[in-house]
């Protein structure tokens, strides 16, 4: 799935459209990675390939010379939230639930999660959001400026309406501003991604991560020991 997403982004970048809408199919935007499969990514080469895809996704969105709108409905969790936050503008349905729930399985965010949250929330609030691992409602996310707009009803129609509005604006000027800002932020994002990759690999070797995954599969509360 990640590999296909990377290819889809390459295809989108090559097309003439100047506005892109990211949305999820089904019950939510993206519920994050498959926790039950994490035990299968024990080989470092496999892990590296997965992280390569993740990093390619978020950096492609961030540097893409287009305006990217994320239309979020239902859950946007873990990597799913990182992907949404990589967009230029986030519209959330009133039923959206946003969470960086990596803490529940003894991991730290990936996909640039630390970078996006620091940009949106500031370091102090970002730390506490990650540590809590709790869900934010769409209204709470708007209050904390984690999303830019909350709507009731058809989220895709709202995103299309917003895209149509922006299409009547001087998009070349808007994209130039994005590129000026993002070219200076890209080195920082890449450092965050490198640190997240290292942290993810180290944390996957811990007893707390093993316990978190086991508890998730067994549908019980984890018993963490700090090891």
Image: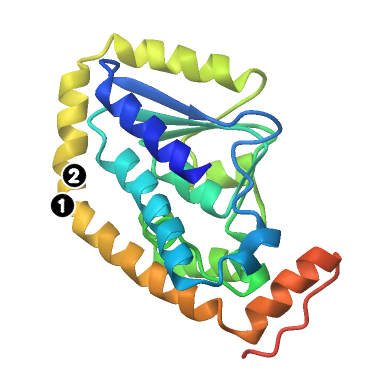
Instruction: Name the residue beneath numbered marker 2.
Output: 181
Left or right relative to 145: residue 100:
right
Task: Name the residue: 52% across, 52% down.
Answer: 79
Task: Name the residue: 47% across, 12% down.
Answer: 161
Residue 133 seen in the figure: no
Task: Name the residue: 32% across, 67% down.
Answer: 194
Measured as percent of width and height from the top left, residue 178 is found at: 22, 36
Image-quadrant location for residue 205: bottom right
Measured as percent of width and height from the top left, residue 83 is found at: 46, 45
Image-quadrant location for residue 34: bottom right
195 vs 208: above or below: above
Frontmost residue, 206 versus 127: 206
Measured as percent of width and height from the top left, residue 117 is found at: 43, 57
Residue 10 seen in the figure: yes
Position of the C terminus, as image quadrant, is: bottom right
Frontmost residue, 111 versus 114: 111
Graded by Cα atoms within 10 Å as few (under 14), some (14 to 19) or many (20 or more), the crowding at tag 2 reads few
Count numbered badges in the picture: 2
Left or right relative to 78: residue 186:
left
Q: Secondary structure at mark 1?
A: helix
Left or right relative to 216: residue 152:
left
Graded by Cα atoms within 10 Å as few (under 14), some (14 to 19) or many (20 or more), the crowding at tag 1 reads few
Task: Name the residue: 35% across, 71% down.
Answer: 195
Q: Secondary structure at mark 2?
A: helix
Image marks 2 and 1: residues in contact by CB distance under 8 Å: yes
Q: Which mark is residue 121?
A: none
Q: CA distance from mark 2 to mark 1?
A: 6 Å
201 vs 24: above or below: below
Measured as percent of width and height from the top left, residue 9 is found at: 37, 33
Instruction: Name the residue beneath numbered marker 1.
Output: 184
């Amino acid at each position: 799935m990640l590999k296909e997403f990377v290819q889809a982004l390459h295809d989108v970048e090559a097309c003439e459209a100047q506005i892109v809408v990211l949305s999820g199919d089904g019950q939510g935007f993206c519920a994050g990675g498959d926790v039950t499969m994490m035990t299968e990514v024990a080989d470092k080469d496999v892990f590296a390939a997965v992280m390569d895809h993740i990093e390619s996704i978020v950096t492609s969105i961030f540097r893409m010379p287009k305006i990217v709108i994320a239309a979020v409905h239902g859950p946007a969790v873990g990597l799913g939230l990182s992907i949404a936050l990589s967009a230029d503008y986030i519209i959330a349905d009133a039923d959206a639930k946003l969470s960086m729930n990596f803490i529940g399985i003894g991991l730290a965010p990936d996909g640039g999660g630390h970078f996006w949250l620091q940009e949106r929330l500031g370091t102090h609030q970002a730390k506490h959001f990650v540590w809590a691992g709790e869900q934010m409602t769409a209204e709470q996310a708007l209050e904390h400026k984690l999303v830019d707009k909350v709507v009731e009803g058809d989220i895709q129609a709202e995103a299309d309406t917003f895209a149509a509005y922006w299409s009547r604006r001087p998009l070349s000027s808007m994209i130039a501003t994005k590129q000026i800002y993002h070219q200076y932020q890209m080195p920082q994002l890449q450092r965050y991604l490198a640190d997240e990759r290292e942290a993810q690999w180290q944390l996957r070797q811990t007893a707390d991560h093993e316990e978190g995954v086991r508890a998730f599969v067994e549908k019980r509360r984890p018993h963490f020991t700090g090891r």
